[in-house]
Amino acid sequence: MKHVIIGAGAAGITAAKTIRACEPEAEIVMISADTCVHSRCMLHKYLSHERDERRLSFVPEDFFEEQKITWISGKRAAHVWTKTRNVQLEDDTVISYDRLLIATGADSFIPPVGDFRKAGNVFGLRHLEDAKQIDKAAETAERVLIVGSGLVGLDAAYALLERGKDVTVVEMADRILPIQLDETAGKTYQKLFEEAGCKFLLGRKASETVMDQTGAIKKVILDDGREISCDLVIVAAGVRSAISCVESGEVAADRFIKVDEYMRTSCPDVYAAGDVAGLSGIWPNAMKQGQTAAYNMCGRKVPYLDRYAMKNTMNFYGVTTLSLGKGVAEEGDEVLICEDSHSYKKAVIRDGKLDSILLQGNMDYSGVYQYLIKNQVDISEKKDRIFALSFGDFYGIAPDGQYDYQI
């Protein structure tokens, strides 16, 4: 059996390891545009020069040899031809397969603002190649404009502030980290970033650009007419699933590749996992999807069940935050807040169940909250102690006399 995997991220690498465990003699071929396996969660550490390429990897140096995997690196999959069971690379090399996993992830979305898509000094931050280009540009750039204040945008800001750059962040919402945090938690980070020299322009959008004769944007004009001078622009305005290899139409896809509960696409023996499948954008879920796809590629009928993806963790300037759920209260919800000089905690209770929780600062015993949200456990009688709960609160005795968790 020949298994081909496109992509060497969390989903692809996990799938490869799972296939090898299930089928010790199977042929495994991995194809990736990247030449280095890396964690995209650590790209900001490359920008700040805290880590080099080697220290971004999440696999051992001899991973491909030890797992007996043929790795075709530095080449992009251009087309997937399901009728002939072939993957065509950008250099027209053709790789045949018996089972195929598409785990190409996602790419930064550069909005059509002015010359953002043409300029040579505008970058997203999604892949190691992006980070390398930004790193090179930052050698001479002093004024950096970042569009978007989500996790990627603030990661980039943090890294470049560490290098002494003049950083300005433009955000269309009225606060930073608008998807992940509420106003109170966001202001904590905003203050820390401002103390480090970062400038924020909130409630504003980039509307036009001024590009010089070298093809570099030197000014970005905001929707209120203000002009922001810059040498380097980083756009952190979201991502799009990397589906270009299936644009021939054989594999059903819209904004992402459509899969069923077994990670199967619309074509026989073709699977998809990770960001390209549009199910989740967080690392643990991508790994689980890769594992699930691999089991099914090896003939085991295993469904993908853990679809909970509303989780964000962050740590800037020594302040840690965990956000679970949407964090948006609806009519009839009960909102509980606990705040002191060291921490901020906010819970949204809906119909007697924990809908979302935000913990900033003290995150002791936080593991129980994801379980409560995912499994919709009724906490009506315990909500007054919501910020002091642990798994011990649900410890009881089973009918057979054994200790058991009563959730």
Image (spheres, rainbow, N blue to C red):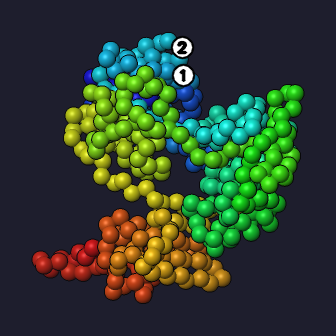
The residue to which callout 2 is attached is 91
* Amino acid residing under circle 1: Lys
Tell which of 116 and 261 is nearer to you.
116
Res. 24 image quadrant: top left
Q: Position of residue 233 (x, y in %)?
A: 76, 42
Viewer-nearest residue: 208 or 62: 208
| Viewer can see residue 51 | no
Left or right of 52? Residue 246 is: left
**Left or right of 283, for residue 34:** right
Callout 2: SS? loop
- Quadrant location of the C terminus in the rendered image: bottom left
In depth, the one of 388 and 259 nearer the eye is 259
Q: Is residue 282 visible?
A: yes
Task: Depth check: give the residue in front, 115 or 371.
Answer: 115
Helix, strand or loop for disc 1: loop
Q: Residues within 10 Å of mark 2 (few under 14, many from 20)?
A: few
| Mark identifier at residue 75 | 1
Q: How many marks?
A: 2
Tag 2: residue type?
Asp
Q: Are marks 1 and 2 in contact (CB under 8 Å)?
A: yes
* Residue visible at 54% across and 13% down in the picture: 91
Question: Is residue 247 positioned above or below 274 on the image?
Answer: above
